[in-house]
Image (tube, rainbow, N blue to C red):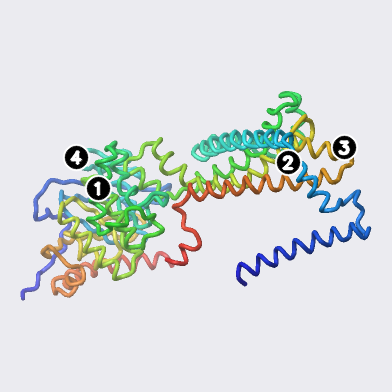
Amino acid sequence: MNVATERFIQLGLLFAILGGWQLGVSVGIIDVFFFPAPMDIFNQIVSWVIDPNFYRHVTITLTETVLGYVIGTGLGVAAGVWLGLSRSAARILDPFIKGLNAIPRVVLAPIFVLWLGLGLWSKVALAVTLVFFITFFNAMQGVREVNPVVLANARILGAKRSELLRHVYFPAAASWILSSLRTSVGFAVVGAIIGEYLGASAGLGYLIAQAEGNFDAVGVFAGIIILAVFVLVIDRILDVVENRLIKWRPNASEERAA
Amino acid sequence: MALAVVKPVVEEPTPQQKKAMVAIDSVTMSFGTFVAVEDVNLTVADGEFLAIVGPTGCGKSTILNAIAGLLKPTSGSVSIDGNRVSGIQNDIGYLFQQDALLPWKTAIENVELGLLFRGVGTLERRERSTAWLTKVGLKGFEQRYPHQLSGGQRKRVQMAQALISGPKVILMDEPFSALDIHTRHLMQNELLRLWQEERRAVVMITHDLEEAIALGDRVAVLAAGPRSRVINSFPVDLERPRDVAEIKLDPRFMDLYRNIWASLRGEVEKSYERRD
């Protein structure tokens, strides 16, 4: 099936679902209290998007996400590489890491609010705890799975420890780390949103929580869609970054040509 | 045409009569209770090409890794150019059996690694590695990543990478065994050409007796493992430069082959019996 036909079918499906939904609302089968009309949701989104005030919420959520993401992955990569290299440290810390990872992060949100207040940093902290472990486990695995022949070769060529890290361990772990970076973006957003949802004065999570408080299903749905787009945009940016960073990796089309 | 009479000689000085570059002195390598090689004595003169043959699993690579300093002998000692080996050696070039290139670096970045780690400046590094890539016939492939090169081309890059810093000793662990037969012949000739330009001591491990005779100045035969040791050593008095495909038709080559195989065959059979 060619791409144009697939696109056409995708569009058809979208129209069928939304059209059926809208139709159901118009003839009264669907209760707008629970499932608001797609047109209403669309109008809500438009009215938000043209309202300059709305971007304050987006900016705040974005800041929390980016901060949580950067701090969480940074710490995760550093700890993962360290424990990947030092087996004894990994063995000693293993039960602690497993224990911490077993805590459902959402229950930490009130504690972070207690410690860091209702502002930005309690949300960042929650995002960090979510992101950290994903990156951490991937970075550790990546370092451990360095090809021993490549490692021996680099050592014989004269690489010192710091050079091994830079030229062998980090690049070898990079594809593992990058794949975890994709997964963790979603978690960074979740951390920020849950934080806002539980207690904040601004942000997309706050918007949704507010709409929910008013039984405003239109607002809730519009907020969800905005969030989905938000994550998709970040994911797309990471796609570009990933292709830049690991251009050495054979991709499917090149493999076939070779 | 007179046939050369080849007698097994355990340790004979090479024709060049040069100083010993690699000296392996009663080396035993064991892993726990498993003794891979026991009481191995070998010397390689400067500029000599020593080929070590032996049945699979006889600890050939272990000896190489002891010279490289990747493994420490349980007893005995290894020295390179009179200095005792302890820890990783940096004045050796090691050609691995497997792909040892850094897959995230281009051909030229791989070749210049040795110089980079020695602190050679960017310009000189680029210049020398470009020259080496040209030397191994890969001009125009500088910016390719290993996955974009064929098996033979990757071997060429590895050769340039191992030789660029002018190592005193070159170690090779079945370097061409993964290549198809035509590529292998090409690479063997290439290797001989490069080595002829600047003769270094070479220790090459192989299970291919033809390769050992075609390339080496001397062929050492290892006994079947465990507790492997050197049982025989045969000088190869075929003149250089050689062509590996043609030399196999030389009657002296066939005599040598017969002689060495007579010594090796028993060991190969033993190694199969032990495995059953």
Q: Is residue B62 above or below residue A103?
A: below
Q: In this rendered view, identify the residue nearer to me: A186 or A207.
A: A207
* Chain ID of residue with mark 2: A
Say left or right for B274 vs A177. left
Residue located beneath label 3 in the image:
A213
Classify the position of the C terminus of chain A by image quarter.
Answer: bottom left
Q: Which residue is mark 4?
A: B82
Q: Residues within 10 Å of mark 3 (few under 14, many from 20)?
A: few
Name the one closer to the observer, B195 or B76. Answer: B195
Which mark lies nearer to you, 3 or 4? 3
Q: Position of residue A216 (x, y in %)?
A: 87, 42
Residue B164 tag number: 1
The verdict on a common chain for dots 3 and 2 is yes
Q: Position of residue B126 (x, y in %)?
A: 27, 45
- In this rendering, which labeled residue sits more in front, label 3 or label 2? 2
Chain under label 3? A
Answer whether labels 3 and 2 touch (C-beta < 8 Å). no
Amino acid under label 2? Ile
The Cα atoms of the two marked residues, 2 and 1, are separated by: 63 Å
Badge 2 marks a residue whose secondary structure is loop
